[in-house]
Image (cartoon, rainbow, N blue to C red):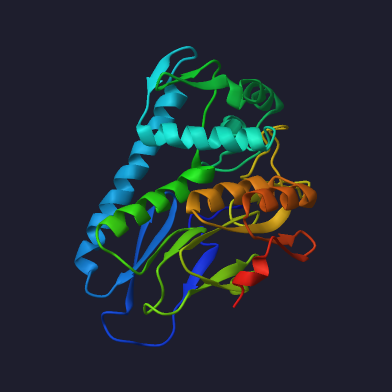
Amino acid sequence: MKYITNLFIIFVFLTFSGCKSNEEELVNKYFFEMGTIVHVAIEAGKEEEYYKIVTFIKELTNKINNDQIKIGESRAGSKVSVSDEFIELYQYASKYYKMSNGIYDPTSITVSREYGFPDKPLSMPSQEALDKAKKAAGFENIKLEDGFIIKYADTYIDVSANSKGYIVDKTVEYMKEEGFKNFIVSAGGDLYTHGMKYGKLPYTISIEDPDKKGSAAEILKLSNKAVATSGNYERYFITSDNKRITHIFSGVSFEPCNNYKSVSVIADTTEQADAYATLYFLSDIAEIKKYCNLNKTPVFIITLDNKRVKLCQWEEYER
C-alpha cells in the first residue's frame, strides 16, 4: 500500500513583483499552525506587530481545537461547554449541512479518523471498525442546546472544513482594528487579500497545479476577496487495488470522495470560500452550478480527466 500525505498544504501561493517605497512594500512572514504553513504579508515598518498576530492566531486555533477535543472525549448525553467561536462555527456548519442535504457533514471525521486522518498513519480500517463508526456518525447526533453541545452517540466533530477560513477572517478583523491597511493572510489553501498591493494594484494570486508542484494552474487578481482550494492531491493514500482514499468524506455515504483534482472558490469571506470549496468538491457539476449561482461564488474546477471548468464569472478575476 502506498501512503502519501503532506502537512504543508499550500494550494494557493503569492506572487509579488516590482519595488516601491518602504512604506508601500509588503514583508512576508511564515509560521506553522492549523496543520499548515500560515503566511502573513504585512506592511513594512509594522513588523513589530507580527508576533501579536501570531499569538492571536495560535490562541484562537487552540480554543477551537480544545472544544473539539472536549466534545470527542465526552460521553453520549453529557453537556459540553464550548466557546462562542465554536458555537458560531457549529451554526455555520449547520447551514452548509442543510444546504447540501447532508453531504457536508463535520461529523464525517468519526469515520475518516478510522483511516488515520487527519494526522495519524494512513491505512485501511477493518470493516467492523467502519460499520461501528458509520453508525455513530451524523450531524443529527450532535446538538447545540442553550449554549452547550450535547452528543447522542460516540460521535466526533471536526469543523476544519471552515474553521481555517474562519480563523483567517478573525485575523483580518483583528489586523484592521490594529491599523493594518494592505495585507494578506493565508493558511494553506485559504487566503484573504485586504487592500491593494503598493496601495494601488490588486494582488496576484496563483492557484497551484495539482499535477505540477510549484506551477500555476490559474493566476488571479484579487482585492478584498478570499479564495480557497480543496483537492485530492495533498492528503490521501493509494490502496493495494489502486483506489485513492482522500481526506474528504461524504456525509451521506461516509465514504471518501475523489470527485475532482481540485476545486477553488472565490468569496467575500475566507470562511465561505473554505466551506464552499469542500461542499463543491463533494457535489456534481450540476449541483455546483446551482450552489455557486445562489451563493455568488466563482468556481474553478480541475476534473479527474484534466478538464478546466470555470463557473459563475470566475473569468472576471483572471489576470
Instruction: Report if residue 20 is visible in the image.
Output: yes
Give percent across and percent down for residue 171: 35, 53
Which is more toward the observer, 291 or 165? 291
Q: Is residue 49 above or below residue 219?
A: above
Position of 128 with respect to 275 (left or right) is right
- Quadrant location of residue 305? bottom right
Residue in the image at 62% along x and 34% along y: 97
Q: Residue furthest top?
A: 77
Which is more toward the observer, 169 or 115? 169
Which is more toward the observer, 108 or 42? 42
Q: Is residue 149 above or below residue 228?
A: above
Residue in the image at 58% along x and 35% along y: 95
Give percent across and percent down for residue 291: 69, 48
Residue in the image at 73% along x and 48% along y: 290
Which is more toward the observer, 319 or 228? 319
Position of 175 with respect to 112 (left or right) is left
Q: The C terminus appears in which quarter of the rendering?
A: bottom right
Q: Is residue 72 above or below residue 278?
A: above
Give percent across and percent down for residue 265: 60, 57
